[in-house]
Image: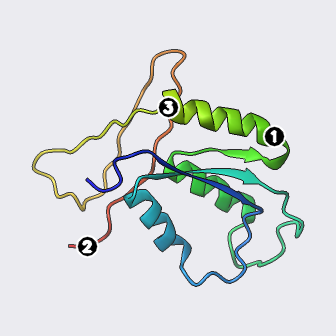
Amino acid sequence: MPGTRKTAVILISDGLDRGSKTPYDKMLNELQEQNVTVYSLQIPDRSGGAYRRDQPKAKVIMNQLAEETGGQVFPFEEASTAAKFICDELRKNRYLLSYTPANVSSYDARRLLLIGDEGITLRTKSFQPPNVK
């Protein structure tokens, strides 16, 4: 299985895309396939969200990128707290739970409901297999 080791990226950004050549969806899919967790330190968006009116807002992108890879977003002002949290999480609190249903195509989308006991925090990746049939 590709990407079974723990890999993390710490992204320091305001979240604005200033002309990437790789589409966001393709980049996100690659991160998910390689099991890369993205943690973000978000710098305030100085444009007030008006940089590109037809594009998703910077804060939304940063949250989506972290959430869909199993990471978390921190304000830049809390960098020391974020560093401690990320180090602790990668060192001792990361478990991989995988599920493969029988008699179902691996390319079909599915939803799972995970419920943790009291005191357990669950974060999931919203990875969907590529739409190839």
Q: Which residue is mark 2?
A: 132
104 relative position to 107: left or right: left
Residue depth check, mark 1 versus mark 2: number of the one nearer the observer: 1
Residue placed under numbered mark 1 in the picture: 78
Q: Position of residue 49 (x, y in %)?
A: 82, 68
SS of the residue under disc 3? loop
Residue at image coords 88%, 66%: 48
Within 10 Å of the Cα at label 1, are there few (<14), some (14-19), or many (20+) other Cα atoms? few
Residue 84 quadrant = top right
Going from N to C along the chain, the mark reached first, 1 or 2, is 1
Q: In the picture shown, does residue 57 fall above or below 74?
A: below
Q: Is residue 94 above or below residue 49?
A: above
Q: Nearer the viewer, residue 88 or 49?
A: 88
The type of residue carrying mark 1 is Glu
Q: Residues within 10 Å of mark 2 (few under 14, many from 20)?
A: few
Tell me the SS state at disc 1.
helix
- Mark 2 residue element: loop
Nearer-the-camera pick, 9 or 45: 9
110 sits left or right of 14 in the view: left
Instruction: Answer whether labels 1 and 2 touch (C-beta < 8 Å).
Output: no
Q: Which mark is residue 122?
A: 3
- Image position, residue 13 (x, y; %): 74, 61
Residue 33 shows which numbered tag? none
For image coordinates 17% across by 58% down, the residue present is 105
* Mark nearer the N terminus (3 vs 1): 1
The image position of residue 107, as x and y in percent, is 24, 62
